[in-house]
Every structure is written in C-alpha cells, then in structure tokens.
C-alpha cells in the first residue's frame, strides 16, 4: 500500500504580485522537503498497459521484471476530488509551486536503470526538487522545475529518474491557439517503426491507468476553449512510453541502460502518429510525430554492452 506523505496536498500560500515578481520569489525561496513513498508492485497495471499498446502481456506474475519506465504505473498520487483545481490537477501539493492558476507541461526526462523492478517488490521512491529556474519565453514567463526520484528495492538503487516540468500562467498559455507542427521533408524509412492512433478512448484509458485527471487529455471543450489547443492532447508520459516500445519490440534481447527524452511540441488526437527509431549498435535515436512534420518528442536509449552470453555492461 502506498505510504504517501501526510502533507502532500496541504494548502499552501500562493504567490501574488506581477508575474516577474512571483516567479522570482518562487525561484529564490521555494524548496520543498524531500519525501519517501513505498508500495508493493503488482502485475495488473502492466497488464493493462500492454492492452493499451495492443501487445501481449509481458508481466504476468511475481518475479517478472517491469519494462523500463513502467514504474510510472505505480506509486501514484491519488488526491481527493475536493483537492483538484479547474484543470483536473491538484490545486496544491508538496512538489507543486505556489504559482497562481498555473498550467503544467511535461518537458522531458532522464533515466538510469541499475536493476529491474519486479512484480512483488516493495519499492521505495525518494523524491526531491533539485532545480527551480525562471525564463521568459515567447508566450510569457516560465517556471522550470526538475524533480529527482530514486527507486530502491531492499535498500539497493534500482532506477534513477529526473523529470523536467514546465509551468506557466493561463494568460500566456491560452493567449492564442497552438500552431501546427512544423513541416519537414520526408526522412528515409527508419529501421524501427510502428504507428499509434491516440483516439479519445485510448487517452481516457491511459488517464485512468495513471490516475491523471488533467482535462486536456479527455475534455475537448476544456482543451480547446480554455487552454487553446486544437484538440485533445496526448500525454507526455504516454509518448515517452511509446518511444520505449521500439527497443522492447525490435531489440528484445538488449537491456536498456539509460533513456532520455524531450517533449518538443504537443501531439493531438485523433490522428495516428508514427514512432520510429534508428539503432546504432550502442543504442538508438527515437522520435514520434505526425508524418511529414517535425517530431513532437525525441529520445535516446543506450544499451548495456554484451560481454558474454550471460552478462552485459553499459557501453
């Protein structure tokens, strides 16, 4: 059972004043305390994610290893309904900056995989804010927050993760409809490729599986009328997991040692997008996007180098 920190959703003071003043105060003084959360890993969430990707079940029972980053299906935050804001996210939280009417975007992440997490493991996640930065972009002021998570099984470090989260205020977020993805010349066919159609049903199922109530993923009126998107938005975590389907499907004998990704532009429902990868022996370059357009997300995996039939080390 998850042991969430008691103050995870405590009401906190909100910053006031002009945008530059509020952002500067958060950058200078907002440093929440690290927290730990513990939970037993079960097989059901991974079985459900296999179905979302239309793939055979790979995690059937105790002892089976989770594919890389599938730990995102566990140790979830589960706030009460009364604690949610208009956008579906919690209004306040230990790792949510005290920015009035903030809008949240998943910017990217970095992972190192030391040992697999398995069904039946008691996993402890240690989480902390490691960086808070402000920047003025083309759409207004941005707050860039980096979270670091370390996952331990029986005291041994299993996975290290860093998440880059971007926050902005609604006047900047909804000032104008999002522009269409930049077009580009057709690239040569990638050795690894498959397509995924993010229709509303798929987006709803992934939201339910990850306990993500952000309305841009299932409420089209809100996504278009309030946040200014042309349609429902594909989850950043879903796109990152879609990238990792490439080595899982096309290089199943290789072990992923690290993974990085960067969100570059929103991908929208319901048109299918193409997920493609170019392996280079040491790893692969990955991307996903609409055909003929710049990718909405890019990533890189590295493999462990094979030393013998039964052992590997990081390249």
Image (cartoon, helix red, strand yellow):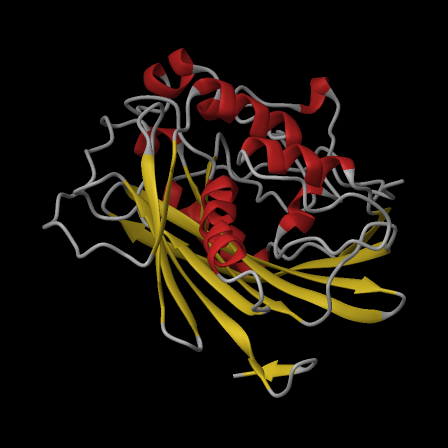
Residue at 47% x, 36% y is 235
| Residue 293 percent coordinates (x, y) | 19, 43
Question: Please, which residue is most extreme toward the front here?
Answer: 309
Q: Position of residue 246 (x, y in %)?
A: 45, 54
Using the image as rendered, state which of residue 122 and residue 255 is in the foreground.
255
Q: Quadrant of residue 224?
A: top left
Judge from the rendering whether residue 295 lies leftward or rightward of residue 82; answer left or right: left
- Residue 217 location (% of width, % of height): 47, 25
Q: Taking the image as drawn, is residue 312 in sight?
A: yes
Q: Is residue 210 visible?
A: no
Q: Residue at x 30, y 43 (%)?
A: 289
Position of residue 247 relative to residue 81, above or below, is: below
Single out the residue that lies furthest toward the bottom. Answer: 307
As drawn, 255 above or below 310: above
Q: Is residue 216 above or below residue 41?
A: above
Residue nearer the viewer, 35 or 184: 184
The quadrant in which residue 153 appears is: bottom right
Which quadrant of the structure image shows residue 233?
top left
Q: Residue at x 43, y 58 (%)?
A: 261
Give x and y (percent) for residue 184: 12, 48
Q: Is residue 312 left or right of residue 243?
A: right
Figure disc tally:
0
Q: Residue furthest left?
A: 185
Q: Quadrant of the N terminus?
A: top right
């Amino acid at each position: 059972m998850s042991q969430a920190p008691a103050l995870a959703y405590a009401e906190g003071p909100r910053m006031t004043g002009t945008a530059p003043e509020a952002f500067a105060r958060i950058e200078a003084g907002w440093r929440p305390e690290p927290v730990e959360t513990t939970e037993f890993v079960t097989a059901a969430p991974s079985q459900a994610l296999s179905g979302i990707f239309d793939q055979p079940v790979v995690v059937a029972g105790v002892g089976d290893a989770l594919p890389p980053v599938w730990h995102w299906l566990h140790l979830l935050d589960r706030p009460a309904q009364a604690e949610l804001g208009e956008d579906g996210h919690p209004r306040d939280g230990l790792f949510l900056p005290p920015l009035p009417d903030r809008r949240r975007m998943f910017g990217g992440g970095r992972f190192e995989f030391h040992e697999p997490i398995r069904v039946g493991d008691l996993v402890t996640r240690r989480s902390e804010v490691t960086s808070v930065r402000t920047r003025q972009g083309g759409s207004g002021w941005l707050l860039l927050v980096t979270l670091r998570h370390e996952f331990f099984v029986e005291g041994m470090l299993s996975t290290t993760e860093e998440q880059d989260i971007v926050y902005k205020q609604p006047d900047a977020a909804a000032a104008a409809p999002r522009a269409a993805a930049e077009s580009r010349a057709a690239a040569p066919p990638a050795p690894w490729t498959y397509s995924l159609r993010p229709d509303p049903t798929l987006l709803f199922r992934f939201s339910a599986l990850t306990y993500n109530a952000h309305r841009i993923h299932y409420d089209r009126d809100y996504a278009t009328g309030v946040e200014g998107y042309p349609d429902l938005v594909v989850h950043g975590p879903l796109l990152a997991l879609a990238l990792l389907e490439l080595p899982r499907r096309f290089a199943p004998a290789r072990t992923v040692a690290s993974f990085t990704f960067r969100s570059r532009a929103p991908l929208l429902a319901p048109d299918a997008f193409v997920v493609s990868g170019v392996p280079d022996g040491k790893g692969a370059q990955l991307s996903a996007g609409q055909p003929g357009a710049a990718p909405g997300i890019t990533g890189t995996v590295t493999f462990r180098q094979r030393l013998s039939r039964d052992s590997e080390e990081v390249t």
